[in-house]
Amino acid sequence: MLSADDRKDEIISLVREGKYLDAIDQLLTIVSLEDDKTYREWWNYRTRGEINLAAKAYEYDEKYFQDMLLSGYIKELPAFRTDPDGGLEAEVETEISDADFTIDCWIFKLDKLDNCSGMCSGSTRTITIDPGRTADEDMLNVTLLHEMIHAYEFMLPEIYRQYVAVRLFQKLEPLIPDLMDLINADIQSEVREHSVLFMLKALDLDLRLNRPPGTVYSYGGT
């Protein structure tokens, strides 16, 4: 197996030869190997609190996020996606099944954060929660759910994000009479950090947890 330095030298050589696709393939291999190494290090040295946090995330994955995995929508989607010219571009079910949706390979850390309760890094597949949230299990759960929405947004293929948002809107509209007002207020907010899809999923979780609207969105209102 080539070392990381050897792979980097090979990438430079491929670029000089104009073999850009081969260079990209080698670069992705390096990234994948580094990700695996980081995950293994976390797995070997994770704390008891981080083990429990990951276990809770795996439970929530099955319980609350199947819609964002598209598992409930495969039969409703067309068999094939077409390109702008009307030709067949991709088999939808295969495209969805090939997407990397698993939360099992994510890293869950308890670490001191400045000015926030939780953080989700899609590029490193890491969810970090401030240890101060562990003092209140309810606040810890809400914070984890908040960051998990970000994680699934990152994993969800861009072409399907709008579809999931529409389906969530259809589900929530009869249950939240002022849903459009909430969406409009969020869009017009001076400080807007979340997408409409995020907001809809957060409201969905509020209802399923029997919590006031905005609880998951705002880390429990704190």
Image (tube, grey):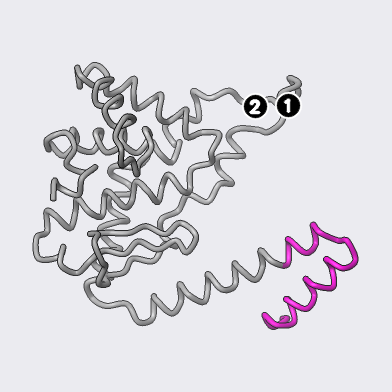
- Residue 117: x, y in percent? 22, 59
3 inside magenta stretch: yes
- Three-letter amino acid code of the residue under disc 1: Leu
| Quadrant of the drawing holding the N terminus | bottom right
Q: Is residue 13 above or below residue 90?
A: below
How many residues crowd around disc 2 within 10 Å: few (fewer than 14), some, or many (20 or more)? some
Does residue 217 appear left or right of residue 28 in this picture?
A: left
Q: Which residue is mark 2?
A: 80
Question: Bounds of the magenta span?
Answer: 1-26
Residue 13 circle label: none
The residue positioned farthest toward the right in the image shown: 17
How many residues crowd around disc 1 within 10 Å: few (fewer than 14), some, or many (20 or more)? few
* Picture quadrant where residue 48 is located: bottom left
Does residue 129 appear left or right of residue 5 in this picture?
A: left
Residue 88 circle label: 1
Q: Residue at x 27, y 59 (%)?
A: 118
Q: Residue at x 78, y 78 (%)?
A: 9
Q: Nearer the viewer, residue 71 or 134?
A: 134
- Residue 188: x, y in percent? 32, 29
Does residue 27 appear left or right of residue 49 in this picture?
A: right
Mark 1 residue element: strand
Does residue 28 appear left or right of residue 66 in this picture?
A: right
Marks 2 and 1 close (CB-CB < 8 Å): yes
Q: Residue at x 31, y 64 (%)?
A: 128
* Picture quadrant where residue 19 is located: bottom right
- How far is the residue under mark 2 from the one under mark 1? 6 Å
- Residue 73: x, y in percent? 45, 29
Q: Is residue 208 above or below residue 12?
A: above
